[in-house]
Image (cartoon, grey):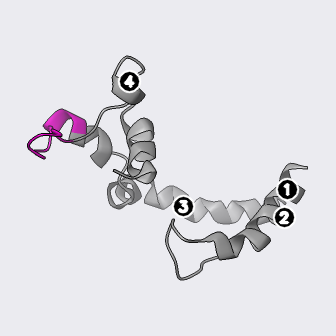
Amino acid sequence: MGFGILGMCASYDPDPDAYLGLHLPLDMETAELIPERWANFAKWDPVNMVEIHGPKLKALRALQRIGVPHRYEEFPDNHSNIDYRMDISLPFLAAALG
């Protein structure tokens, strides 16, 4: 199991008293979904969240109107193997946080 999945578990269904401080949405022996655990994941699924928060996303244009510095970029990749973007991302973050 990759660290990405564990990170999602820690965010979506944390439990400091559980092993590794998180719950998995499935039974590790049978791979069956645990309905109450899966429900915690489903509420954070972007597909589900857009139904709830979609109208608010349109308001993000207000950032420009009220002078909040920001930058939006898209690139054809995912959350893995993005080291080639570090020369762009890290200086940007360092300047923003500095």
The main secondary structure of the magenta stretch is loop
Q: CA distance from mark 4 to mark 2?
A: 35 Å
Q: Secondary structure at mark 1?
A: helix
Judge by depth and name the residue closer to the eye, 12 or 83.
Answer: 83
Q: Is residue 72 visible?
A: no
Q: CA distance from mark 1 to mark 4?
A: 32 Å
Residue occupying image coordinates x 34% and y 61% = 47
Q: Mark 3 and 4 residues: CB-CB less than 8 Å, in contact? A: no
As drawn, is 26 to the left or to the right of 74? left
Q: Nearer the viewer, mark 3 or mark 1?
A: 1
Residue drawn at the location 30% of the way across and 38% of the way down = 40
| Amino acid type of the residue tagged 1 in the rendering | Ala
Disc marking residue 94: 1
Q: Is residue 89 left or right of residue 77?
A: right
- Give the left or right position of residue 71, taking residue 41 as reference: right
Is 27 one of the magenta-colored residues? yes
- The x and y percentages for residue 42 are 28, 48
Image quadrant where residue 20 sits = top left
Q: Earlier in the sequence, mark 3 or mark 1?
A: 3
How far apart marks 2 and 1 lie (CA) works out to: 5 Å
Q: Which residue is mark 4?
A: 15
How many C-alpha atoms fall within 10 Å of the one at disc 3: few (<14), some, or many (≥20)? Answer: few
Residue 91 bears which disc, if any? 2
Kindly identify which residue carries mark 3.
Answer: 57
- Is label 2 in contact with label 1 (beta carbons under 8 Å)? yes
